[in-house]
Image (cartoon, rainbow, N blue to C red):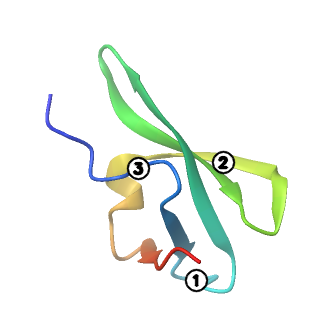
């Protein structure tokens, strides 16, 4: 399996909502299932979403931001 270019702690913003920063918490890899990343919102750690790696790396949907 190829290496996933995302590590816990990496930060992303949605293209449509650039002010919201999401932090990669956990890489989820399951057999016969594409890899996903569990993200928590920087300003509200109780807000959690799970996104496929391919969606997270799609520049039309998300952008990587510098870790602060």
Task: Give the number of the mark in front: 2 or 3.
Answer: 3
Name the residue at 32% across, 52% down.
Answer: 54
Q: Position of residue 18 (x, y in %)?
A: 60, 85
Task: Give the number of the mark in front: 1 or 3.
Answer: 3
Q: Position of residue 58 (x, y in %)?
A: 33, 66
Q: Residues within 10 Å of mark 1 (few under 14, many from 20)?
A: few
Q: Quadrant of the N terminus?
A: top left
Q: Residues within 10 Å of mark 3 (few under 14, many from 20)?
A: few
Indicate whether 5 appears above or below 65. Answer: above
Name the residue at 43% across, 76% down.
Answer: 63
Task: Identify the mark at residue 16; answer none if there is no mark.
Answer: 1
Q: CA distance from mark 1 to mark 3?
A: 23 Å
Determine whether the residue tagged by mark 2 lies in a helix, strand or loop: strand
Q: Which residue is mark 2?
A: 49
Task: Give the number of the mark in front: 1 or 2.
Answer: 2
Q: Which residue is mark 3?
A: 7
Q: Nearer the viewer, residue 43 or 34?
A: 43
Determine whether the residue tagged by mark 1 lies in a helix, strand or loop: loop
First of labels 1, 2 by sequence position: 1
First of labels 1, 3 by sequence position: 3
Name the residue at 66% across, 48% down.
Answer: 49
Q: Position of residue 29 (x, y in %)?
A: 38, 25
In the displayed orientation, state which residue is furthest to the top.
Answer: 31
Position of 2 with respect to 68 (left or right) is left
Image quadrant in which you'd find residue 42: bottom right
First of labels 2, 3 by sequence position: 3
Q: Nearer the viewer, residue 67 or 34?
A: 67
């Amino acid at each position: 399996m190829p290496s996933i270019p995302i590590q816990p702690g990496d930060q992303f913003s949605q293209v449509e909502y650039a002010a919201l920063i999401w932090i990669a918490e956990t890489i989820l890899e399951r057999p016969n299932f594409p890899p996903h990343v569990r993200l928590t919102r920087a300003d509200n750690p109780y807000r959690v979403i799970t996104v496929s790696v391919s969606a997270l790396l799609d520049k039309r949907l998300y952008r990587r931001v510098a870790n602060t």
